[in-house]
Image (cartoon, rainbow, N blue to C red):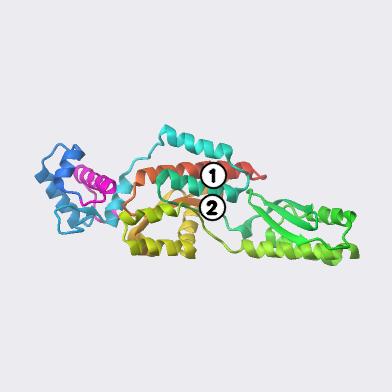
Amino acid sequence: MAGTERGELGPRKQAVLRAVVEEYVRTGEPVGSETVSERGNLGVSSATIRNEMAALEELGYLTHPHTSAGRAPTDIGYRRYVDMLPPGRLREPQRRTIAEFFHQTAADMEEVLLGATRLLSTMTQYAGLAAPRAPAEDRIARAELIELGPSLMILLVGEHGRVYKAFAERPEHATKDTAEAASSRIGSLSGLSLSEAAERARAFATEAPSDQRDLLGLVAQALDDVRLRSEEEHVLVGGVGNLAAEVVTWRLDTVRRLLEAIERESEMLTLLRRASVADDLSVTIGGEHPSTGEWDAAVVAAPFRSGEIPAGSIGIVGPTRMDYLTAMTTVRAVARRLSELATALDPQQ
């Protein structure tokens, strides 16, 4: 940790750093010693606080962003502040908001995750992010062939509630008995991975009686399409508009770069994948990672699990000038509820 590398801070320096960070997060303006004296309740003079701020700047925790006497936190200062934070507690309205969301939520895990990103965005005013477990690892809990008039829908439900759908035109010569026989074969795909299911469906099409082959061939092709689509990992994002609103606290080009990064997804996936195998919530601040350094951003993310098995990660991205305590407390609470839901949806738990 940065704080350890620079030696331990005494209680007064910690208090001054905390006061500067919290005032800067609140106002976005460089913080002077008189402001810390007035708002920090430290019981020492402005001159003493000024000396402590100068020492914190020399240690790399604070910087002079302008020619004013005020100072702002550096990435290292934010890191030290985050490391000093005690565990946060949700306020009752926040607790109710999360409870109501999960009470009303669906059983489709991807739909839940998208809703959870919007929930986080609403509660923190940053952009919510989520990355489900790589779909290639998902096993099928239920597989059905559903007739929709002239079309057929192949419906697959993954073991963690993720829903996969594909459509095919029904062959003209396919009778009701043919469709029922094919449906019975599709039902036997439960327990297989998506790639195994696609391979098994191709075998069905080869081995089946001649009147079922065309139909099962279409099913096999549809399952292949599902498999290929599922291999395209993606980030679920909610509340991107909140990033645009941050132009007042970020430079416009910083917001533009971050929005482009979300569109490219690969950088976000790297951070979220790393969070998905972590033991607990992680905070990546500015220059601690090449991506967040480029964006002048911070990412707060936490893993969620099905039992003991990693099932994905969820978090937020926002400016380094972030309300870290609220962000960390909220992300951790939502991740905990996602773990409970993923475990409940897992037929093996």
- The magenta span reads 1-30
Q: Residues within 10 Å of mark 1 (few under 14, many from 20)?
A: many
Marks 1 and 2: in contact by CB < 8 Å? yes
Where is residue 96 drawn, in percent x and y?
A: 48, 34
331 left or right, relative to 74: right
Residue at the bottom extreme, as displayed: 206
Magenta segment, prevailing SS (helix, strand or loop): helix
Q: Amino acid at mark 2?
A: Gly
Front-lying residue, 219 or 284: 219
Q: Residue at x 45, y 59 (%)?
A: 271
Secondary element type, mark 1: helix
| Mark count | 2
Three-letter code for the amino acid on which mark 1 is drawn: Leu
Left or right of 216, for residue 315: left
Where is mark 1, residue-wise? 338
Would you say residue 200 sits in the magenta stretch? no
Where in the figure is residue 191, as x and y percent of width and height?
A: 72, 53
Q: Residue at x 46, y 46 (%)?
A: 120
In the rendered image, the quadrant that contains the N terminus is: bottom left
x 64%, y 55%: residue: 138
The answer to whether 338 appears left or right of 38 in the picture is right
Tell me where residue 229 appears, x and y as whole percent. Answer: 63, 63
Residue 24, given in percent of the width and then of the height, sits at 25, 49
Kindly identify the residue that appears in the image at 23 percent across and 51 percent down: 29
Residue 84: mark in rendering: none
- Residue lying farthest to the front in this orientation: 149
Residue designated by label 2: 312
Q: Residues within 10 Å of mark 2 (few under 14, many from 20)?
A: many
Q: Separation of disc 2 and disc 1 at Cα?
A: 10 Å
